[in-house]
Image (spheres, rainbow, N blue to C red):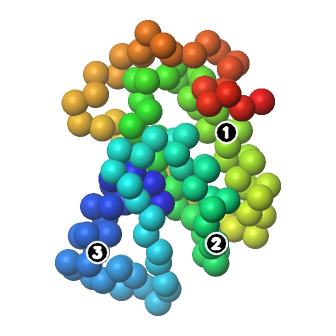
Amino acid sequence: MGDSYVCRGLERARETMGTNLGLSAHLNWFGRGGMQWRALIPFFPKSTFEEEQFQIHCGGNDLGRLRSLVFVSAMKQDLHDFNQQFTQRRTVLSAISRPGGSSGAVSESAYTDGEHPWGRA
């Protein structure tokens, strides 16, 4: 579940091993190109999941837009809330990859430390 990496992964899986990647398991792929972290968490309450595990690949599109400490703090809080909501599921967070062409510079509108960038408490 996540950004364009997930979309491209699904396309590649269909072309090669099948959408279940040759495993004796059922995999669901949820991806949207350009997805930022703040769009990931609101997706969950609107969805019904039967999966035992979530693999999340998201956040690369946020790099350089927020200060790193603020972004990591927001991710931790969101993942904590997510795990409280989906207590019987395992969450795996993949490494975050910087999108192509990103300079990594923090934008002028970056948030201050200790403040959740999406206005959450």
Q: In the rendered image, which residue does mark 2 sit on?
A: 48
Whether residue 41 is visible: yes
Q: 10 Å neighbourhood of mark 1: few (<14), some, or many (≥20)?
A: few
- Going from N to C along the chain, the mark reached first, 3 or 1, is 3
- Secondary structure found at label 2: loop
Q: Amino acid at mark 2?
A: Thr
Find residue 22 and report its image quarter: bottom left
Which mark's residue is nearer the viewer, 2 or 1?
A: 2
Q: Which mark is residue 13?
A: 3
The vertical placement of 34 against 67, above or below, is below
Q: In the shown orientation, is residue 56 left or right of residue 88?
A: left
Disc marking residue 76: 1
Q: Residue at x 47, y 78 (%)?
A: 27
Residue 82 locus on image (x, y percent): 70, 53
Residue 73 on image: x %, y %:
65, 30
User: Which amino acid does the dot numbered 1 rest on?
Assistant: Lys
